[in-house]
Image (spheres, grey):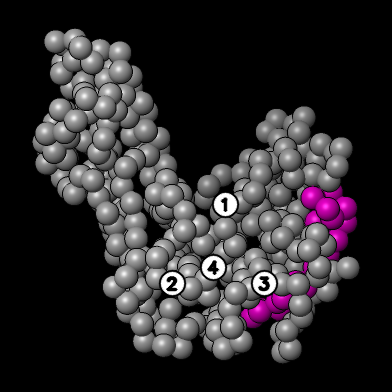
Amino acid sequence: MRLSQIELLQFRSHKKELFEFDPDVTLISGINGSGKTNILEAIHVLLTGSSFRAQDVHLGTYETNWWRLSGLVDDIYREIRYQRDNSPPKQIVLKNNKKRFHNKDRLPVVLFEPHDTLFIYGSPSRRRADVDTMIASIIPGYKTTQNRYERAVRQRNNILKDHRNSSMINDALFAWDVMLAEYGANIVAARQRFIDRIDSKLAEYYSAISGNTDTVHMGYIQTIPSQEVSEFHKILLSKYKDDKLRASTTSGPHKDDFKILLNKEDAKLSASRGEVRSLMLAVKLAFADILEEISQKKPLILLDDVYSELDSQRKQRLSETLKTNQTIITDTHAIDGINTIHLN
């Protein structure tokens, strides 16, 4: 898949701008505040239908209620229109046909932004959210299953809080336990398959970026280690005592975690900032491979401020590794040998 150009109208800080991209790597260079990330955001919206930073209503320039993005993807015209007062407010134009945007209109994109290092440094909830977002982009219906599971957890927690001293609490919990087991086992299974696929590619990409042979492993830490609904249900029942005491559901996918190990040590504790950035880039490139396998299209890769905290050798190796996909990068400085868009 190749994006050859994009035009921004009333989008973020760009009233009317046209940008053209190299089929391999393009660098968008400019000082902080010049609108580099806004261009990546526009590309993300054009290809996926959604922003990675804000809701549609907030993407227009100051005091406007509309914006428009258009471009050529594999030489096919593609346009996203947003008008706040329209119904529906967001539409896609493909081959001169205008319609409501649907998930099937999404094209494969992989984004790296500086905050992605919080997957290692941040909280378990951040890691769960990041993994679930990636899975939802490749498994239809996963988000629905996740929403149903989370609703069941909330309802179960309400019962635990409101009826903790009732002799009928076990009966009240039973129906929600059945749902938790079904949805929870499906989530655990999907997560485990996804992590296994990422893990199988992780060391190769990390080595390509870092230039060394460190061992790298990504693991899934499950509070209910079962992908079978009946077994999940049994384990959930065994947690009743703790759950009643805490008035909360103490185990399940909503309490699980993920960990990246570098040379068998937790990367959060042992890795340098450059190593952490290299690890997360390796995760993103592994995810790009999975997206390609599923969509049968090479994903476009967007890298925001990717080179900071990487030494010169890692920068060079990353640039070489990226040549298999069209890639668009932002940085405050131009780099020799890379086609560059300069922003004032």
Q: Quadrant of the N terminus?
A: bottom right
**Which comes sooner in the sequence, label 2 or label 1?**
1
The span from disc 3 to disc 4 (Cα, nearest Å) is 14 Å
Q: Using the image, tell me which numbered label, if any, was put on residue 329.
A: 3
Left or right: 223 as drawn, with respect to 268 = left
Left or right: 341 as drawn, with respect to 248 = right
Indicate the amino acid at tag 2. Ala
**Which comes sooner in the sequence, label 3 or label 1?**
1
Q: Which residues are magenta?
A: 8-29
**Secondary structure beneath disc 4?**
loop
Along the line of sight, which residue is nearer the eye, 204 or 256?
A: 256
The span from disc 3 to disc 1 (Cα, nearest Å) is 24 Å
**Secondary structure beneath disc 3?**
strand
**Which comes sooner in the sequence, label 3 or label 4?**
4
Indicate the amino acid at tag 4. Pro
Identify residue for label 1. Answer: 105
Identify residue for label 4. Answer: 299
